[in-house]
Image (spheres, rainbow, N blue to C red):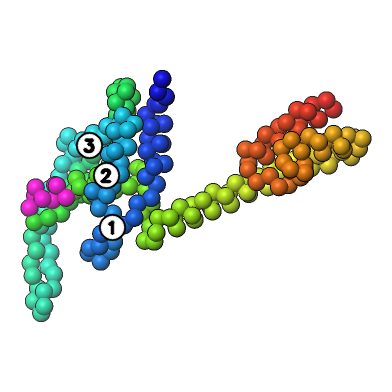
Amino acid sequence: MAEQLNIYQKMAKIRKSVEVLEKNKSGYGYKYVTDDAILEKITGLMDKHHVSLIPNVVPGTLESEQINWQKTKGEKLENINEVLVKGDMEYAWINDDDPEERIVVPWIFIGQQSDASQAFGSGLTYSMRYFLLKYFNIATPDDDPDSWRSRQKEAVAAEDKALSEGIIKQLDGMVRSYLAKNSDDSEEVKKFFGKYVKGGDYNKITDPTMATKVLTDFTDKFLSKE
């Protein structure tokens, strides 16, 4: 039987699969990820995990106004007349396996073009693009995505090491205190740690989950009988 996931678990799986996207187009003086690149990555995962996304312009929030400005063209000033369209949005993630289960996220859209319909369309396009990028915390580095993943792993490893060191420091204090009172148990204590790490040297443990388990097990085995 297939694993039944709730909407939050499904979204977490999608996020993990789209954590970084390479910028694939240049324009307006910068590089960016195109809508197609974002959607081709996410929509397949939405199908796989049975999730739908429904965008909705909040009724009564749509606004438009005429924007007049000037830009220099050669030695002349050119008058530009455009329409600014904006409004509030909601994006609803739906669990297709249980449609009553959903996540509704407030958002906005803003578009500015020479034509109102174009402004509305571009506003929706930009809104969707940045909603997906920000909702899934997708990184769009200028360098190779593999380099970004490498730095990400280094950051996680550094945090795990720091957490482990704190736990091991606490464990070390407990071990020293116990052996000061129970020196005859030194071989038993060494044998105990040998089950978790080669040579019984608990200072070599770098995984915080393992460090926590060793601390808990040591407490249960040796300190609970004091």
Is 138 in front, or is 121?
138
> Which quarter of the rendered picture does the N terminus lie within?
top left
Checking the image for residue 40, the label placed there is 2
- Magenta residues (range): 115-122
Q: How many numbered tags mark residues here? A: 3
Sequence-wise, which precedes: disc 2 or disc 1? 1
Q: Amino acid at mark 2?
A: Glu
Given residues 177 and 218, the one toward you in this image is 218
Is residue 166 at least partly visible in the picture? Answer: no
Residue 93, given in percent of the width and then of the height, sits at: 30, 32
3 or 1: tag closer to the N-terminus:
1
Dot 3 amino acid type: Pro
Which mark, by number, is residue 55? Answer: 3
> Is 150 covered by the magenta stretch?
no
Residue 91 image point, x, y percent = 27, 36
Residue 118 included in the magenta stretch of the image? yes
Q: Secondary structure at mark 2?
A: helix
User: Tag 1: residue type?
Assistant: Asn
- Mark 1, other Cα within 10 Å: few <14 / some 14–19 / many ≥20: few
Label 2 Cα crowd, 10 Å radius (few <14 / some 14-19 / many 20+)? few
Figure check: 2 above or below 19 = above
Residue at 21%, 35% in the rendered image: 56
- 3D distance between C-alphas at marks 2 and 1: 13 Å
Q: Position of residue 55 (x, y in %)?
A: 22, 36
What secondary structure is marked by label 1?
loop
Task: Return the disc, 2 or 3, that comes first in the chain's sequence.
Answer: 2
